[in-house]
């Protein structure tokens, strides 16, 4: 019940925001189009996902290989991951990536970019000015 009330409260707060602030709010996190070939998994729309995020494919790949514990090769129109993986597993990691590197943690919009502050990498939001420290993918 408490959860429901909270949702309702959010809806109400949402209803009071000016329309301009709402414009990008419903950023949809893209889903991977995948298939398994032998012992590998292929993501057919990898480059599209990276460009929807406005990110370098290599950065997204680094994150995915680390998270999925498998190396991947970027090809012109797809990515090959050296492991058999379910689409739902890949989609979950893409969502994690979006939350960590693309969406602003304050306004949830995707209008962010990487920046630096006192030699520390940060992710900064163009929409609301919010920022947070950026984790380096090792
Ligand atoms: Zn923001």
Image (cartoon, rainbow, N blue to C red):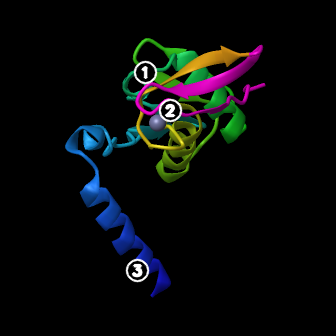
Q: State which quarter of the image contains the C terminus.
A: top right
> What label sits on residue 4 in the rendered view?
3
Residue 43 picture location, percent across and down: 46, 32
Q: Where on the picture, by quarter, is residue 22?
A: top left
Closer to us: 31 or 38: 31
Compared to residue 120, the image places residue 96 above or below, namely below
* Disc 1 target residue: 54
- SS category of the residue bearing label 1: loop
Tell me the tag on residue 87.
Answer: none
Q: Secondary structure at mark 3?
A: helix
Mark found first going from the N terminus, 1 or 2: 1
Q: Alpha carbon of mark 2 to alpha carbon of mark 3: how far?
A: 28 Å
Q: Which mark is residue 102?
A: 2
Q: What residue sits 47% from the left and 78% below the top?
A: 3
Q: Which residues are magenta?
A: 118-138
Above or below, 55 against 45 in this view is above
135 with respect to 98 (left or right): right
Reading the chain from its start, which is encountered first: label 2 or label 3? 3
């Amino acid at each position: 019940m408490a959860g429901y009330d909270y949702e309702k409260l959010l809806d109400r707060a949402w209803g009071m925001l000016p329309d301009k602030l709402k414009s990008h709010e419903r950023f949809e996190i893209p889903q991977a189009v995948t298939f398994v070939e032998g012992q590998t998994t292929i993501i057919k729309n990898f480059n599209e996902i990276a460009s929807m995020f406005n990110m370098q494919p290599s950065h997204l790949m680094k994150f995915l290989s680390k998270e999925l514990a498998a190396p991947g090769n970027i090809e012109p129109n797809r990515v090959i991951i050296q492991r058999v993986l379910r689409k739902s597993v890949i989609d979950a990691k893409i969502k994690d990536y979006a939350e960590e590197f693309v969406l602003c943690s304050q306004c949830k919009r995707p209008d962010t970019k990487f920046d630096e502050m006192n030699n520390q990498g940060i992710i900064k939001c163009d929409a609301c000015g919010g920022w947070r420290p950026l984790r380096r993918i090792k």
